[in-house]
Amino acid sequence: MALTGAGHEPGHGYGRGQGHGHDAQQDGQGRPLGRGPRGPLSGVRVVELAGIGPGPFAAMLLADLGADVVRVDRPGGPGLAVDPAYDVTNRGKRSVLVDLKSPQGAARVLDLVERADVLIEGMRPGVAERLGVGPDDCLARNPRLVYGRMTGWGQDGPLAHAAGHDIAYIAVTGALGMIGAPDGPPAVPANLLGDYAGGSLYLVIGVLAALQHARTPDGTGQVVDAAIVDGTAHLTAMIHGMMAAGGWQDRRGANLLDGGCPFYGTYETADGGHMAVGALEQQFYDRFTELLGLDGLSSARKDPARWGELREAVAARFKSRTREEWTAVFEGTDACVAPVLSLREAPQHPHLAARGTFTDVGGIVQPAPAPRFSATPAAPAGGPAQPGADTASVARDWDVPGLAGKGGDA
């Protein structure tokens, strides 16, 4: 399988480009005008108080699924933000500029809150309250509002007011200590495990569950306290069960799923690439050793005393050919082996290209919305929102004329 020449063909429910149908009219930001329902959250209104990291990603997911997300940007923008034109986590949203420290700032946000279903904020505990847009103020204006709070440490506890980033949050949960070679330091998994898996996704789950409750006959709004430490700890549930049962050692590189066994890990190829091996079950392992040309070591799977011998033999075999050659050997088999691709290579993988797993919006190759829906397909609603560019349209659509006092999206 050569990783060249694969196009970005539409997948199930996804179109090329904007993904709203090829004849949709668009505004100056590439967003469709006059579109019908899009995605399962069509009709849900979300206010996002601008921040960085997991909050914007959670709001992007809601926008991907069809929600009308209005991002309240601050003059000057947040710290550590990328160029707004390339910030994919702001795709499909609309942006208004509000200075929450100004005399009318809180009132403008509360006008939006009154008409919203959900609010998302990622400030340190107590900051939103001091700005006049905390849960009490917002729920007083809209008792059915779902108020989503995204933090690293949570709203209470000894570290609640301390600064932090992904790496610290996953460190104290035990998750970071699980990752890496036994004779080296823990490996840093970018900021995917804490910020986005333990943070954003748990916030979205909580928001949707609370939204379901709010829409029942006797339902009310409520606060969702999504802490990255809580979500990341929750992700380790299976490992804690295995450890209690004696099936997991509390150290790196000594277990079935952490690279401790030679048939679940990565190996370098002749050209400096890598192959990922996950041949756990006996039938998959047998196929793996057969295709690798190591039939004589089939019995080593069940004998940990021979795992060192097996690892050396597997490593030597993989070093004898290039990544592309080994990919061709294992492609389409049940050996559970795959090439380790870079971010730029991944969109061209034939399977991902055929499914439309990645898409191109405004010239930026990016992941398409996930998961997929048979009756209410979702798709990106255009490129990243530009700060303040949608003030006039939001003021009109949400019936908040006071927003248009400053800025606009002519």
Image (tube, rainbow, N blue to C red):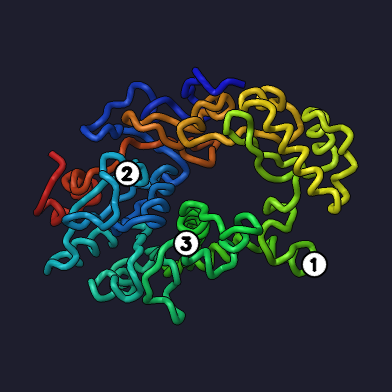
Label 2 or label 3, whichever comes before in sequence order = 2
Q: Is residue 13 visible?
A: no
Residue bearing mark 2? 87
Horizontally, residue 163 falls left or right of residue 178, namely left
Name the residue at the left extreme. 405
CA neighbours of label 1 inside 10 A, class few (<14), some (14 to 19), many (20+): few
What is the CA distance from the residue labelled 2 to the residue labelled 3? Answer: 22 Å
- Observer-nearest residue: 33 or 240? 240
Residue bearing mark 1? 245
Say which element carries label 3: helix
Q: Is residue 388 visible?
A: yes
188 versus 131 height, above or below: above
What is the CA distance from the residue labelled 1 to the residue labelled 2? Answer: 44 Å
- Observer-nearest residue: 217 or 387? 387
Residue 409 found in image quarter: top left
Residue pictured at 52% horizontal, 59% vertical: 198
Residue bearing mark 3? 167
